[in-house]
Image (tube, grey):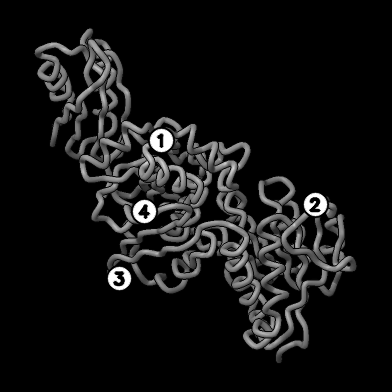
């Protein structure tokens, strides 16, 4: 039997918290019809109530101590919107121990401590939901856990960070370098003052860890996932990618094969004909290949108050429905395997190599010989016009080859006098 009212407590009233509360209050009547009960935001906890926001709550809802949520027996669902690890982990674990269902979009928390928290929720017979942790407003967690539960997921390839996708899109469309575009992204609010988590690939790493743990039913140590950001991508690389029929994207990749996982985050050349190549600006997309479902792509806005707030509210509605049904907390962590993550040296893919060399006869032959001696075969060689006097650039595209062989070949190339610099090494996917 449905209850008259289900109460929500919110911890953290920044971008995501504001988006979720605004949606819960603005669409309260519509949500009540969906749930069968009023979903009421009773308590909002934040340390800085003087800060200006695009939406606020009544004074009687405003608190500064998390105990206002934890110690209130009328609070049924807690939204954790703090971010980070330490305070967020305490908030979530304590809420679960107080037998309150929890909704969190905190990707780092779920990637590092999700199994522990899911088991804690199951023991307390409450829910822990985290749809907003990957892809913002894109529904991807629930489809992976439910709609595709019977499929064998072969590969996941995602553009899952809006900041880096915005930067790469601007570099592609405007021909500018990374630093200049990053400064604009920060001014527009698309990039943080400290953009490290985004531009160095940490954010995408947490997200592929979550998706892969669901897809492959295995515990994942995020510290073993290779991650490489976009800080070394140049306008020259963007230009040559266009000429060769590619766009550069920061990809989060997950696949299973030979009893191990291939998990990595790095920039990659993506063919213009691939669906991910047309994902621009702050948009995200996750491309899933499964058996028997085939190819699927989930696309939409990957961050922000509205999209992430929408995902959080969807989880709140699910929690509220489960409370009414008496069906909360039935699913502990389903990570029943401990598959190893294969080392990056073992990964096999194609490569784009941009080299600066002496402008003299025989250079290409010498370099091609060294590449061949290390088992690196080539699909194409491209020598663009180079404005610098006394030097030249050569661009190489390889066949599929093991990472270790490419790295060994590059070390050998650096030792010959005709090579001035290995300017770029970017993997080619798709």
| Residue that mark 1 sits on | 176
Question: Which of the numbered marks, if any, corresponds to residue 293?
Answer: 3
Q: Position of residue 66 (x, y in %)?
A: 83, 57
Q: Residue at x 36, y 45 (%)?
A: 173
Q: CA distance from mark 3 to mark 1?
A: 40 Å
Neighbours of disc 1 within 10 Å: few (<14), some (14-19), many (20+): some
* Badge nearest the viewer, 2 or 4: 2
* Badge nearest the viewer, 2 or 3: 2
Question: Which of the numbered marks, if any, corresponds to residue 157?
Answer: 4
Residue reaching furthest bottom?
Answer: 1
Query: Circles 4 and 3: CB distance less than 8 Å?
Result: no
In the picture shown, does residue 391 fall above or below 381? above
| Residue that mark 2 sits on | 51
Q: CA distance from mark 2 to mark 3?
A: 48 Å
Q: CA distance from mark 4 to mark 3?
A: 16 Å
Question: Which of the numbered marks, if any, corresponds to residue 39?
Answer: none
């Amino acid at each position: 039997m449905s209850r008259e009212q289900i109460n929500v407590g919110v911890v953290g009233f920044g971008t995501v918290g504001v988006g979720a509360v605004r949606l819960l209050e603005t669409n309260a009547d519509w949500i009540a019809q969906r749930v069968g009960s009023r979903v009421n935001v009773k308590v909002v906890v934040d340390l800085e109530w003087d800060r200006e926001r695009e939406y606020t709550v009544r004074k009687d809802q405003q608190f500064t101590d998390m105990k206002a949520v934890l110690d209130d027996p009328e609070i049924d669902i807690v939204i954790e919107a703090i971010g980070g690890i330490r305070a967020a982990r305490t908030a979530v674990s304590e809420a679960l121990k107080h037998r309150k269902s929890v909704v969190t979009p905190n990707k780092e928390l779920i990637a590092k401590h999700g199994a522990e928290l899911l088991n804690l929720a199951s023991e307390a017979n409450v829910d822990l939901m985290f749809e907003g942790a990957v892809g913002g407003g894109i529904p991807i967690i629930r489809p992976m856990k439910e709609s595709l539960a019977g499929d064998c997921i072969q590969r996941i390839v995602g553009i899952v960070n809006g900041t880096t996708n915005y930067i790469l899109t601007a570099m592609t469309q405007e021909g500018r370098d990374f630093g200049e575009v990053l400064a604009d992204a920060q001014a527009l609010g698309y990039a943080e003052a400290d953009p490290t988590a985004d531009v160095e690939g940490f954010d995408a790493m947490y997200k592929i860890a979550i998706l892969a743990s669901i897809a492959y039913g295995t515990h994942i140590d995020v510290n073993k996932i290779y991650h490489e950001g976009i800080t070394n991508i140049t306008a020259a690389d963007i230009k040559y990618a266009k000429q060769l029929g590619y766009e550069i994207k920061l990809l989060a990749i997950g696949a299973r094969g030979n009893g191990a996982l291939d998990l990595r985050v790095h920039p990659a050349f993506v063919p213009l004909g691939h669906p991910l190549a047309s994902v621009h600006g702050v948009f995200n997309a996750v491309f899933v290949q499964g058996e028997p479902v085939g190819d699927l792509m989930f696309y939409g806005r990957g961050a922000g108050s509205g999209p992430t707030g929408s995902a959080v509210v969807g989880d709140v509605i699910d929690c509220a429905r489960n409370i009414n049904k008496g069906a909360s907390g039935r699913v502990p962590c389903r990570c029943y395997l401990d598959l190893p993550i294969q080392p990056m040296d073992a990964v096999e893919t194609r490569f784009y190599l941009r080299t600066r060399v002496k402008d003299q006869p025989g250079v290409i032959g010498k370099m091609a010989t060294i590449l061949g001696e290390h088992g690196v075969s080539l699909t194409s060689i491209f020598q663009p016009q180079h404005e610098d006097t006394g030097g030249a650039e050569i661009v190489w595209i390889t066949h599929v080859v093991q990472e270790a062989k490419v790295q060994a070949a590059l070390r050998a190339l650096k030792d010959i006098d005709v090579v001035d610099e290995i300017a770029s090494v970017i993997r080619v996917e798709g």
